[in-house]
Image (cartoon, rainbow, N blue to C red):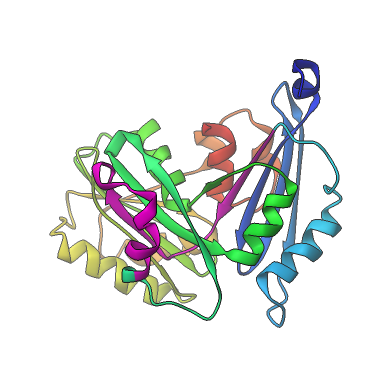
């Protein structure tokens, strides 16, 4: 691909989740070129079949892309020290953390260089094959994106528990002086269940209800958590993308997931 073609080819970003797919394209040289769409999943159909339908409906097939990046929204991930990172052992390590299912999966990884860690996560093998047909793809897990955000925008507080709540998926990241203490994900639709698990982690790590900070980001689940958690934690801070990422057209898109917005603006 020559330089002129590259300049005219947009970046394609896809967010894959069991509840739906997000598609976003833009030309880096033209910020006003951003186009975004969301396609819900049919629970009666496989994820790969849902993606095939969404991809066809998106009108994005058959085009050339300068860069393709895909977020795999999953609560099943694990981390390993970077010095022990060996791709030949990914399946063994991941399989020891999560029981095998009937579906074949492809194990993916992200390197968190700032913290000397590697994140392992998985994608449906059939869906992975479909994505390979689009072009060369770079894959990300939400935990990798949120960790990148926390590294780029460090907090002044000594100890912070970040909760990213999007749909039924919750991600918790505990940090002390910029160092990760815990990263965990779980699925729950009820705010009270999310709050219970959050407070269990808070207590287990011996965070102070008066001194330490809860940082919330995500959709309306994060709003509900803020209302509930204030009865137990004094210092609660809400990440507002419109304030964090000022003067950006992505802020005009309603309900764009925070991890997708962060990937686009912090890459």
In the image shown, does 65 or 18 lie closer to the viewer?
65
Taking the spot 87% from the left edge, 50% from the top edge, the residue there is 59
Q: Position of residue 176 (x, y in %)?
A: 19, 44
Q: How many numbered marks does the figure carry? A: 0
The residue drawn where x is 48% and y is 79% is 101
* Residue closer to the observer: 14 or 2: 2
Is residue 208 magenta-colored?
Answer: no
User: Closest to the observer: 59 or 165?
Assistant: 59
Identify the magenta region.
Answer: 67-95
Q: Hey, which residue is sitting farthest front in the picture?
A: 88
The picture places residue 121, in percent across and down from the top left corner, at: 44, 58
Residue 98: x, y in percent?
A: 37, 72
**192 or 135: nearer the viewer:** 135
Q: Residue at x 62, y 58 (%)?
A: 128
x, y (%) of residue 175?
25, 46
The quadrant of the picture occupied by the N terminus is: top right
Which quadrant of the view contains residue 27? Answer: top right
Residue 153, visible in the rendered structure = no
Residue at the extreme left of the image, as rendered: 206
Q: Is residue 189 left or right of residue 215?
A: right
Is residue 20 toward the left or the right of residue 54 in the image? left
Report the residue at 41% width, 64% height from top. 225
Residue 85 magenta-highlighted: yes
Q: Is residue 118 visible?
A: yes
């Amino acid at each position: 691909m020559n330089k002129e073609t590259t300049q005219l080819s947009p970046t394609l970003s896809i967010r894959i989740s069991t509840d739906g797919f997000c598609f976003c394209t833009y030309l880096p040289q033209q910020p006003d070129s951003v186009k975004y769409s969301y396609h819900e999943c049919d629970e009666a159909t496989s994820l790969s079949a849902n993606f095939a339908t969404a991809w066809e409906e998106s009108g994005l097939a058959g085009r050339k892309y300068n860069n393709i990046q895909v977020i795999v929204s999953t609560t099943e991930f694990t981390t390993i020290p970077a010095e022990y990172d060996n791709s030949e052992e990914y399946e063994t390590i991941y399989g020891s953390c999560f029981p095998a299912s009937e579906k074949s999966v492809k194990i993916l990884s992200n390197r968190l260089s700032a913290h000397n860690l590697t994140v392992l996560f998985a994608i449906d093998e059939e869906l992975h094959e479909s994505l390979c047909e689009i072009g060369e793809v770079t894959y990300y897990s939400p935990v990798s994106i949120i960790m990148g955000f926390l590294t780029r925008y460090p907090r002044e507080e000594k100890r912070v528990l970040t909760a990213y709540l999007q749909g039924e998926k919750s991600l918790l990241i505990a940090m002390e002086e910029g160092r990760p203490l815990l990263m965990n994900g779980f699925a729950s639709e009820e705010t009270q269940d999310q709050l219970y698990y959050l407070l269990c982690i808070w207590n287990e790590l011996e965070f102070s209800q008066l001194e330490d900070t809860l940082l919330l980001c995500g959709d309306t689940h994060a709003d509900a958590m803020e209302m509930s958690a204030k009865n137990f934690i004094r210092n609660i801070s809400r990440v507002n993308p419109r304030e964090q990422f000022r003067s950006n057209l992505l802020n005009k898109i309603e309900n764009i997931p925070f991890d997708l917005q962060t990937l686009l603006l912090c890459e």
